[in-house]
Image (tube, rainbow, N blue to C red):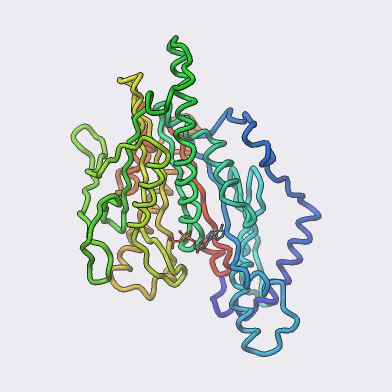
Amino acid sequence: MATSATLTTTHLSTFRNILDEWHQNRSKTTPTKGFLVPFEELQQSSKKDALKDVIVAFRTRPPPNEAAEKFHGDPDAQDAAETEAASAAVEFCSGITVTSAEPGVFFAHVPGMKWSGPTLTHKPYEADLAFGPDVGNEEVYQRTVVASDILSLALSGGVGCILAYGQTGSGKTYTMESVEHRVARDLFDQARMVGKRLVLAQGGAQASDTEAGDIFEFNVTFLELLGKHATDLLESTEEVDAQGNPVRTAIAVREDKVGNVRPNLISSLIRTSEELEELINKALSHRRTSATLRNATSSRSHALLTISIKNKLLPYADEGQLILVDLAGSERHEDSKDHDKQCMEEARDNNKSLMNLKECVRAKAKMAAEDGFVHIPWRSNKLTMLLKPIFDIESRQPSRAMIIAHVSPHIQDSVHS
Ligand SMILES: Nc1ncnc2c1ncn2[C@@H]1O[C@H](COP(=O)(O)OP(=O)(O)OP(=O)(O)O)[C@@H](O)[C@H]1O
């Protein structure tokens, strides 16, 4: 049985004691194994064999500083107001336990109530990787994007996709923006290396001055999907609506006559890391944010950055694609109850598209594991239609999806998690 928010707050100290005891017992029985390769050795590591088509990583954010301090108890907190503030803060930090490890697991500590008093059920969830609150953005990037070799896959004509998934306020944009900037930093160096190998393989002499642009052409689009409405984040506009949000041209998301989903977006030719970085900054500054109960700067939309990579040496080869997706947050009913009608509809459409995405990811993972046919319902939603290169089983292109699932540390979110 799940408890209400009030009940959770009332029994926080009991929950904290149960949790402390659980942590003590767990450390005796299950030593944490940690990551297979230490961070310092990651760059040299060649652990790239047997990569899966779908890789899932958990990430949790640290609680705000003052909440962490209060969680460990303030013996001097005497008055009721202080205790109440401590209780409110404590809610932030006791709902889950994520230990950084590979393979990874997170425990949701689900509060409940029995005749004998408050209880916590410790539910484990497994994934390929897990990042606790102490792991920084560079390490997350190295262990996900770099270790899964997604840039090389896209440069070799495949489709690489990185998705940040999770509840609103759980840290998706924090992760994804850092991934986007690091991809901008690394893509052209990686392209130069892949390009040189290609020139050699074609019997050409390895020219030390081969540049990424000699071999590849990079075109970038940036789409925002809010509810059912798609717009182009690279479109500049001065016009704003009654809420002060920029008014942009609606973009149709549909299959064309030959089955491609190619929305009519501004496509920018990019030649250097700096140009890509500038474009990302421009698009992100256009992204709409609004305050929600859980996040003062919630994005509330899906943002898809797509880098198409044409190989100039192999004009008939498939174009590689790198798709970086900062998904809209899933919102519980309680999180959206203060929304106006339009926001409610958007939250409902967002949740629906996320459900659909989950179905497609599960079907793709099942298909990869069983090596047989599984129907992937990617046509049911605009979001999954935009991810057709990943989900279409008729596609000849190899693909890999890395899902970074963000888990809120808040105890009242454990049921949702
Ligand atoms: N790992 C982290 N370390 C430090 N701060 C973090 C971390 N993750 C998130 N934050 C901070 O938490 C706040 C919420 O994060 P963010 O906006 O990324 O959440 P979100 O999941 O994208 O939310 P929404 O779906 O509402 O847009 C931000 O202020 C962000 O800087």
Q: Quadrant of the N terminus?
A: bottom right
Q: Nearer the viewer, residue 246 or 355?
A: 246
Q: Position of residue 74 (x, y in %)?
A: 72, 78
Residue found at the very far bottom of the displayed protein: 79
- Image position of 416 (left or right of 245): right
Q: Is residue 31 something one can see in this rendering?
A: yes
Q: 279 or 233, which is in the foreground?
A: 279
Q: Is residue 375 visible?
A: no
Q: Is residue 353 above or below residue 387?
A: below
Residue located at (61% from left, 51% from top): 131
x 62%, y 31%: residue: 47
In which quarter of the view is residue 210 placed?
Answer: top left
Q: Could you tell me residue 278's position as x and y percent?
A: 38, 47
Question: Is 206 above or below relative to 35?
Answer: above
Q: In the rendering, at what x and y percent does residue 351 appear?
A: 38, 59
Q: Position of residue 262 (x, y in %)?
A: 25, 39
Q: Is residue 277 above or below residue 8?
A: above
